Amino acid sequence: MSRIFSGIQPSGTLHIGNYLGAVKNWAALQHTHESFFCVVDYHAIIAAYEPADLRARTADMIVSLLAAGVDPSRCTLFVQSMVPEHTELAWIFNTITPLGELERQTQFKDKASREESVPAGLLNYPVLQAADILLYRADRVPVGEDQVQHLELSREISRKWNARFDAGVGAGDAFFPEPEPLLTPSRRIMGLDGKAKMSKSLGNTVGLLEPADEIWAKLRPAVTDPKRQRRTDPGTPEVCNIYHLHKAFSPPETVQHVAVQCSTAGWGCIDCKKVLHESMERELVPIRSRAREVAANGALVKEMIDAGADHARRVAQATMREVKDRMGLT
Ligand code: AMP
Ligand code: TRP
């Protein structure tokens, strides 16, 4: 059974892009894979933040993950800063990672271009990410499309370390695996403005735990096929963001029906959005109710996370013993 690892920043609550691109897949994969899921607070402190706020966002993210179906009896769920080996391995990987590869990362270039003063942590962010994954020697990483480049770098770091320190074993049983992304059909959910990827920092998100009326208030004015100006104009489903959300939330018969109604102008966009809203509610109502249950049970959640961190730490320490042994560290 291959091992999977994935991480998410403690941004408070999940949005439907996180959910459809990654976390829903976590909940499915935990049944078939040995799974480690981590709230990555060491990654989050690279951006300016308030300490009390970070703690609250971490707790809220855990509630969101549990509500979305991540089940600590089937996976190891924990917070990154509870397992210090993540930063220890990241330091080691920093010593073998080419600077040029880090400078080429799209996310680094984007973020650095918007900062007056760029912290070294922003450059080294993907090195910590490689350490997260390889600490558990995970070979599959369920993420959205925006993480694919980071994973290419993780594979390069793995190859470099193996070549240098993993004496004499064949490629098939190298110490560190080369982790591959596991993408879903919803690998890149667009924001409701239809312009860019759904992202917390762009303010174009739909929260997984948002109340029904607030979701409708966002869906109603959401961008559809820009060529469909009048109710009687036929639309092109493939260019419409609402159609793509139908594919994620509606059953196949409904998706087919939507495509026909759109391309024949049988339905207007509002009709189509109402049906989408119903499909979303079917999936989101149980998630919201689970979130309420979990949030009311703080002590139990803390216990689950402590147990997750204990297990993660044991696996991490075993990896670090071997890494240090092979590297001549004590
Ligand atoms: P982040 O909130 O950036 O920590 O992302 C957490 C996970 O959600 C990562 O696996 C991302 O690739 C995924 N993700 C974030 N935004 C989107 C999106 N708009 N569509 C699909 N996946 C996404
Ligand atoms: N960089 C990821 C994101 O922003 C979060 C992350 C950190 C991660 N470490 C990871 C994802 C390890 C997968 C595996 O979404």
Image (tube, grey):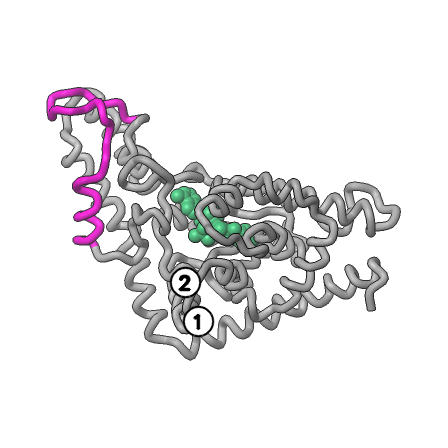
> As rendered, which of 257 and 239 lies closer to the eye?
239
Report whether residue 31 is seen. no
Could you say which disc has been placed on residue 51 in the image?
1
Q: Nearest the camera: 49 or 82?
A: 49
- Find out if the beta carbon at label 2 lies less than 8 Å from the nearest ligand 1 atom: no
* Residue found at the far right of this picture: 168
Whether residue 45 is visible here, answered yes or no, is yes
Q: State how far apart marks 2 and 1 are (Cα).
A: 15 Å
Q: Is mark 1 within 8 Å of ligand 1?
A: no
Question: What is the x, y in percent for residue 49?
Answer: 43, 64
Determine crowd level at label 2: few under 14, some 14-19, many 20+ residues with C-alpha closer than 10 A: many
Amino acid at circle 1: Pro
Q: Which residues are magenta?
A: 212-237
Q: Earlier in the sequence, mark 2 or mark 1?
A: 1
Q: Left or right of 265: which side holds 14?
A: right
**Please, what is the three-letter code of the amino acid marked with disc 2?**
Met
Q: Is residue 242 magenta?
A: no
The mark lying in front, picked from 2 and 1, is 1
Image location of residue 197, percent across then percent down = 38, 40
Q: Quadrant of residue 36?
A: bottom right
Would you name the residue on which mark 2 appears? 61
**Mark 1 secondary-structure assignment:** helix
Residue at point 62% right, 40% down?
152
Q: Quadrant of the C terminus?
A: bottom right
Marks 2 and 1 close (CB-CB < 8 Å) = no
**Relative to 284, is 178 on the left or the right?**
right
Q: Neighbour class for label 1 at 10 Å: few (<14), some, many (≥20)?
A: few
